[in-house]
Image (cartoon, grey):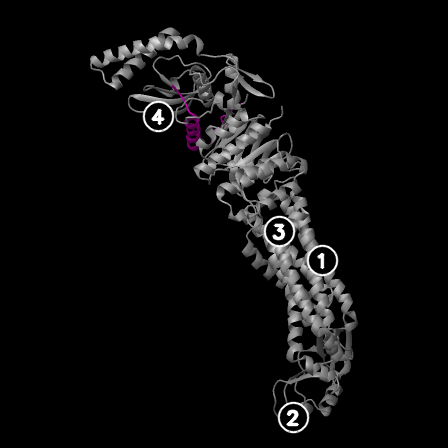
Amino acid sequence: MTAVLDASGLGKRYRRRWALSDCTLSIPPGRVAGLVGPNGAGKTTLLHLAVGLLTPTAGTITVLGGRPAASPQQLARVGFVAQETPTYAALSVADHLQLGARLNPGWDSKLADSRIEQLGLDPGQRAGKLSGGQRAQLALTLAVAKRPELLILDEPVASLDPLARREFLQSLMEFVAGHEASVVLSSHLVADLERVCDYLIVLAAARVQLAGEVDDLLATHHRLTGPRRDPATLPAGQQVIEASHTDRQSTMIVRTSEPIHDPAWTVEQLSMEDLVLAYMAAGATVGRRPALEVQR
Amino acid sequence: MTWLTWRQFRAQAWVAMAALAALAVTLAVTGPHLATLYRTTRRGDFLNLTQAGSYHVLSLIGAFVVLAVPGLIGLFWGAPLVSRELEAGTLRLAWNQSITRTRWLAIKLGIIGLAAMAAAGLFSLMVTWWSSPIDHANESLLGPAVFGERGIVPIGYAAFAFALGVTAGLLIRRTVPAMATTVAAFVAARVAVTLWVRPHLLAPVRVLSVITQGNLNTYTQHANGPLGGPITVAVGVNSPGAWIVSEQTINGGGHVVASIPQVAACAGNRGATPPCFTRLAQLGYRQLVAYQPASRFWAFQWDETAIFLALALLLAGFCFWWIRRHVS
Amino acid sequence: MIEFHLDARSGVAPYLQLIHQVRQALRLGLLRVDDQLPTVKDVAAGLAINPNTVLKAYRELEYEGLVAARPGVGTFVTGTLSDASLAAHGPLRQDLQRWLAKARRAGLDDESIEALFLNTFRAGTAQDVA
């Protein structure tokens, strides 16, 4: 099956600064992919490249096998909810649905209307008077009612309160379960992604630090605690992501597909947050290191 | 897309229509009386009547409206078109519907551009009709103060101002600076064309004539004394409503001079009298006048409209090129 | 029908939490044969979790023979965990109560009892594995 997003050597430069560089990535279909990284890591740049709002400076990107925003057909296959979930302040909720219906041949008005009703939005209300959560839900409605194969969301919940955040993610998951769409979702907060993502991409310092299925990543990463030890003496199959030492003790996060037999170590499972933080820290300290990629 | 364009544009459209209606009513009520007045009074009286009082005020208002409308269109229809959506981030919404951004821009430019031209054309049509008696009496249609407020040329100005506003908004990306730039650039373009392009659109008619009491327009003696001082004069041409583009004084040797040096016959209070003019003719002084006859009014209108429409198309083409490569 | 909940801080993978909750409900008799489980869409929407997580949990339960998917209808309970062991619960609880009383008389407080129990329990499982 075609990858929903396929990037090869992808880079984007603004004047002299590379916002994204050497990004090679292949997101399989049917996933909810979480794109995590600190602010300014290049998440928005990558997503804008994927929806064709930006053109690459280097490398190539294809989305669902096509060039982003190249044709009305390509645009119809990808739904996008931009950061801050922009809507037309002067237009009413009903106007927005009208806009969606007129500009998208595949518009599902039943889905749109039932969502607006379920959300309890007044169709006559101007979008400018909606709360942040309601506006985000309206933007999501516009994006899902065009019935895209891939839904791309750029920090959709970043500015929402916890309740609105939960409601938004519920709506999103309901759509994914009901319509079998793929999703790429960015956030700088791991907690937003932990429940919803089954594919993870960590972006830091304009580079992809880690990408892969969440289950695989969690199964192959471990935290080892034990007597102080030089990371260089670990077996060849164990790649050290992060290491810290006191005068007697060493704590390391390692990646390995082999079981760890050394009885000196206490082996612990990592949470997604531990994993993301380890790779973000690695990206921040070794900015120039080549991307650590899991290609399967 | 047509629906969305109209939905976003309709407030501005209503303002324009209300202004058109208000002007139409005012001019329709007063116009017929003005025309009757022109037919029933002598030219001098008619001019006196229309150079003061309510008709004078109305003619000024009409001229101002037609003068200002293209600039206002650039300011309020053109500049915010893209920049406001860039500022609010709504382009990211609009450009992710199932319609390419080229088509989005084409429909926006097409519909609002045509509306701009229609509005400017209607304003100009009404004012041209209403002020035709005054223009006939004044014989001044080609003059720079009137030419741009009559006929079809405001349509060209409006198309250009609109395209200029859109371009500024696209490049500057912020509404208020884009508006300021639009107005400044539009005024600069209008002034430049009026001063440096329009006079050369058609080769002017040149006549060489002696200075007489009859054709004299202005006479300036720069110093006065027993021997007189340098003199500058300007003469008219025998062509009603002509637009005098340039005028030079030529001496007996056939050279252009800035002024006529002191001539005894014109010294003191003898200046601008028949003996003075006779003496100037004897010395060989002639006036070389280049002018555009009033009959060329429509030729100028078409030419200048075409120039501004071409500029508007160039700017629109630039917008399409830019929007495909640079904007996000 | 049962309702699922997730404990984000437990550190237990969400799909395992779902499996535990179904097994617990079967054990306590809250779910019986032919009862329907909530649809994947309802669970995903209700908990704001990835539908694949729910599918994974249901597939695991199916593999264990506890539930079966009926295409186009939903997922239904087919097995049970309560029948054989439920009868043994009463006597075991009495034994445990006697043991607890003995531990208190020996001067153990609640925390010590809990630690002792968990330690013994873990040592037991470790021996089973080895």
Residue type beneath disc 4:
Ser
**Does residue B231 appear left or right of residue C104 in this picture?**
right
Task: From the image, state whether disc 1 or disc 3 is nearer to you.
Answer: 3
How far, Cα to Cα, is label 1 from label 2? 54 Å
How far, Cα to Cα, is label 4 from label 3? 58 Å
Residue corresponding to mark 4:
A244
Same chain for marks 4 and 3? no
Give the residue at x 54% y 56%. Answer: B176
Q: Does the magenta run of residues contain A286?
A: yes
Residue corresponding to mark 3:
B8
Residue type beneath disc 2:
Asn
Same chain for marks 1 and 2? yes
Residue corresponding to mark 1:
B309
Snapshot quadrant of residue B182: bottom right
Residue corresponding to mark 2:
B269
* Quadrant the C terminus of chain A occupies: top right
Which residues, given as a range, are shown in magenta?
A268-294
Q: Chain of mark 4?
A: A
Asked if disc 4 and disc 3 are in contact, CB closer than 8 Å, the reply is: no
Q: Nearer the viewer, residue B105 or C103?
A: C103
